[in-house]
Image (cartoon, rainbow, N blue to C red):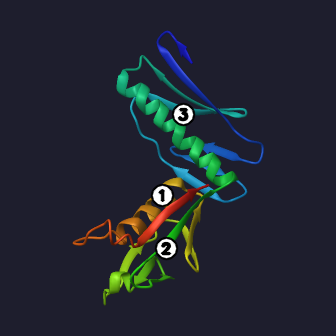
Amino acid sequence: MVLGALIREEIEIPEDVEVTINDEVQVKGPQGQISRKFVYPNITIKKDDDKIIVESSFPKKNDKAMLGTIRSHIRNMITGVTDGFSYNMKIVYAHFPMAVKVTGNNVTIENFLGERHPRKAKIVGTAQVKVKGEEVEITGINKEDVGQTMANLEQATKVKGRDPRVFQDGIYLTNKG
């Protein structure tokens, strides 16, 4: 909403979600709790009854862009603590059967293209990875952690030094939920 020299974005807070705003925004819901600090000059975040208000007075172009970014981050935080995020991936191989398993904070990929040394992909933050046969499921309440973990898995199985038209082995994203 634009009011002359003030831009204001409102985010509805669902009934089962608690939001507290101090020097950081804390969102607590049935799935868990996320907190994040937003520091940007000329943008204020406050809570009003059942809404979060993000506003900027006399905004420049960058302020308007950051206002939308902060609004999206807060919406993602609310979605995360209510529903959570889930990405499904598929293990694909044609030449050598891969063994994928979760070990601590890493996902270990053994026998990728017949390599002797296992490849590792880092699990970021609070994301959880489950491997069931040829399916890999990544779940969590923080969208950035889940997405980065998925990207780490894809990058760990990137084919280098071979023809990618022939060697299509890897772990690929099939569904974002």
> In the shown orientation, is residue 123 left or right of residue 135?
left
Q: Position of residue 83 (x, y in %)?
A: 68, 54
Q: Could you tell me which quadrant the N terminus lies in?
A: top right
Residue 169 drawn above or below residue 62: below
- Alpha carbon of mark 1 to alpha carbon of mark 3: how far? 26 Å
The first of marks 1 and 3 along the sequence is 3
Q: Which of 116/13 is in front?
A: 116
- Find residue 91 and name its label: 2
Q: Amino acid at mark 3?
A: Ile
Q: Amino acid at mark 2?
A: Ile
SS for callout 3:
strand
Q: Which of 27/111 is in front?
A: 111
Q: Position of residue 49 (x, y in %)?
A: 72, 32
Q: Which of 23/99 is in front?
A: 99
- Alpha carbon of mark 2 to alpha carbon of mark 1: how far? 17 Å
Residue 55 drawn above or below residue 147: above
Which of discs 1 and 3 lies nearer the camera? The answer is 1
Mark 1 highlights which residue?
A: 147
SS for callout 1:
helix
| Residue, far right | 15
